[in-house]
Image (cartoon, helix red, strand yellow):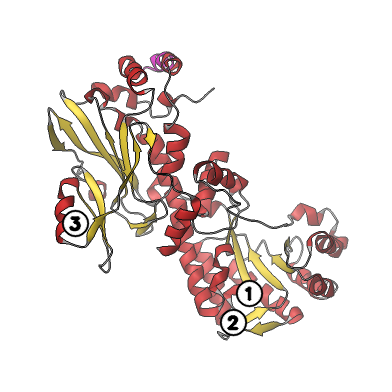
């Protein structure tokens, strides 16, 4: 079935136009991360929603189909409202969406996005109607970007202490395409990871960056790499021939070649690489990346590095840590923030630089999270009734963490301050804040009355993410 904007919501949303107070004119809602695992969030995901979904005009054909579908589903349908949306606004939502810059690191419990209807009061139901798709895009991409960013800080710390921090952009590679629930999730999550890094095996992420984030040149990279079947299909007795074929095919001067090496015995494989194949690796001018794929990650990586060191040797860098000659290691099994810390800590204590290892992260990067990982929510916080704005909020006795904010909101930042430099304030307080303090508003118009008015590129977003 072709995409129908009316049906991209929850079943209970179509009845809400009948539930608002008499005289309702404007509705104001906001999105925030209320808590969760990380004390901050790297904002992401609004732009794909706006370009892919909100930019699709509602048509009379959509209305006819949705009317029939929802009637059968048992849900009221605002046919008059949707018809006026088509006739008066060309089928595009008459809302104003404001947000912080994508890529920006913002402490939790702050408004990241606000949505308000503009124009005729009869469209007062529109901000809430789009809650489901906009929140879904924002919470997912923001959570992936936040996980990726947090791991980036871990790796960066070890590189600064033991190695070359310039290697950071390629230290966490996205292996997650097969571990997510859909191709769309792979693309969106993979793109969010690429706010922070430049390595991926998720091709769908490239489409998202080209289509929705203005990429004009290749935004991420990969290398030739084996899988178990391309090694085991040679047979156990011919394991060395499978490895030699990898070198014959891909080992060129300056190239990087990755080969999974634990289909049988990882230490025996290291010995093959370091004896029968050693001279070919050296003569090729390529860097071989050995990939163990089983066992305890923190233990096996150090064991592999030591075994490779015994064959290829290493050099002590300016920071006093050993860097392998001609070979590196990538760990792609059991990788998450905790195991990465363990691997890097073990290497450091053994005198090895973080330069020696990279990480491939799959389900833990793109799938092992949900909306509650950062406690994301979109809530109505103000309603204009008969010309007067009133606060709208929830404050459940049984869960203070779900207490919502009140009023029309914006986000300000004190660039001159220390510590927590962000504050979510009432919009009417903004002028006073900017006149009497170093706080400045950082929310911007992104979508106004059917038009995209801010369009960030991946290059701009990466610059913001790198400056966090």
Magenta includes 444? Answer: no
The spot of residue 398 in percent (x, y) is 22, 46
Q: Disc 2 on helix, strand or loop?
A: loop
Up/down of 229 relative to 318, above or below: above
Residue occupied by mark 1: 302
Q: Residue at x 75, y 55 (%)?
A: 228
The spot of residue 220 in percent (x, y) is 59, 54
* Magenta stretch, main secondary structure class: helix
Q: CA distance from mark 2 to mark 3?
A: 52 Å
Q: Is residue 367 visible?
A: no
Which sits in the foreground, 344 or 298?
344
Q: Earlier in the sequence, mark 2 or mark 1?
A: 1
Q: Is residue 463 visible?
A: yes
Magenta includes 74? Answer: yes
Q: Quadrant of residue 319?
A: bottom right
Residue occupied by mark 2: 350
Q: Quadrant of the C terminus?
A: bottom left
Q: Disc 3 on helix, strand or loop?
A: helix
The spot of residue 390 in percent (x, y) is 14, 36
Q: Which residues are magenta?
A: 67-76
Residue occupied by mark 3: 434
Q: Are marks 1 and 3 in contact (CB under 8 Å)?
A: no
Which numbered disc, 1 or 3, marks the residue closer to the eye? 3
Which sits in the foreground, 21 or 350?
21
Up/down of 117 relative to 423, above or below: above
Q: Are marks 2 and 1 in contact (CB under 8 Å)?
A: yes
Q: Are marks 2 and 3 in contact (CB under 8 Å)?
A: no
Q: Residue at x 35, y 29 (%)?
A: 93
């Amino acid at each position: 079935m072709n995409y129908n904007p009316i049906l991209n919501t929850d079943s209970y949303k179509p009845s809400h136009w009948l539930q608002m107070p008499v005289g309702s004119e404007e509705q104001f809602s906001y999105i925030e991360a209320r808590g969760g695992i990380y004390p901050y969030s790297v904002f992401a995901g609004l732009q794909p929603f706006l370009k892919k979904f909100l930019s699709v005009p509602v048509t009379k054909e959509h209305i006819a189909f949705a009317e029939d579908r929802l009637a059968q589903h048992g849900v009221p349908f605002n046919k008059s409202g949707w018809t006026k949306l088509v006739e008066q606004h060309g089928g595009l939502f008459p809302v104003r969406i404001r947000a912080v810059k994508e890529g920006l690191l913002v402490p939790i419990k702050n408004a990241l996005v606000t949505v308000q209807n503009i124009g005729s009061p009869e469209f007062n139901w529109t901000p809430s109607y789009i809650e489901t798709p906009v929140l879904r895009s924002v919470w997912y991409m923001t959570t992936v970007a936040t996980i990726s960013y947090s791991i980036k800080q871990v790796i960066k710390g070890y590189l600064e202490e033991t190695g070359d921090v310039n290697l950071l952009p390629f230290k966490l590679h996205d292996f997650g395409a097969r571990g997510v629930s859909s191709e769309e999730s792979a693309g969106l999550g993979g793109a969010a990871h690429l706010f922070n890094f430049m390595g991926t095996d998720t091709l769908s992420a490239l489409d998202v960056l080209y289509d929705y984030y203005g990429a004009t040149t290749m935004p991420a990279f990969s290398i030739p790499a084996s899988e178990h079947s391309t090694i085991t299909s040679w047979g156990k007795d011919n394991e060395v021939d499978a490895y030699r074929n990898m070198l014959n095919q891909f080992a060129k001067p300056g190239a990087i070649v990755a080969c999974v090496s634990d289909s049988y015995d990882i230490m025996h494989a290291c010995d093959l690489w370091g004896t029968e194949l050693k001279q070919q690796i050296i003569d090729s001018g390529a860097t071989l990346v050995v990939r163990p794929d089983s066992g305890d990650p923190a233990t096996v990586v150090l064991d592999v590095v030591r075994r490779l060191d015994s064959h290829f040797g290493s050099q002590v860098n300016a920071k006093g840590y050993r860097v392998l000659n001609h070979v590196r290691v990538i760990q792609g099994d059991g990788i998450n923030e905790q195991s990465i810390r363990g691997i890097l800590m073990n290497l450091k204590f053994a005198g090895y630089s973080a330069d020696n290892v990279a990480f491939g992260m799959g389900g833990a990067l793109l799938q092992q999270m949900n909306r509650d990982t950062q406690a994301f929510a979109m809530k109505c916080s103000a309603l204009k009734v008969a010309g007067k704005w009133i606060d709208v909020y929830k404050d459940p006795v049984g869960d203070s963490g779900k207490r919502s904010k009140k009023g029309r909101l914006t986000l300000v930042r004190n660039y001159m301050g220390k510590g927590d430099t962000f504050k979510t304030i009432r919009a009417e307080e903004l002028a006073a804040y900017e006149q009497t303090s170093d706080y400045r508003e950082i929310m911007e118009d992104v979508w106004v009355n059917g038009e995209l008015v801010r369009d960030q590129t991946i290059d701009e977003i990466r610059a913001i993410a790198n400056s966090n």
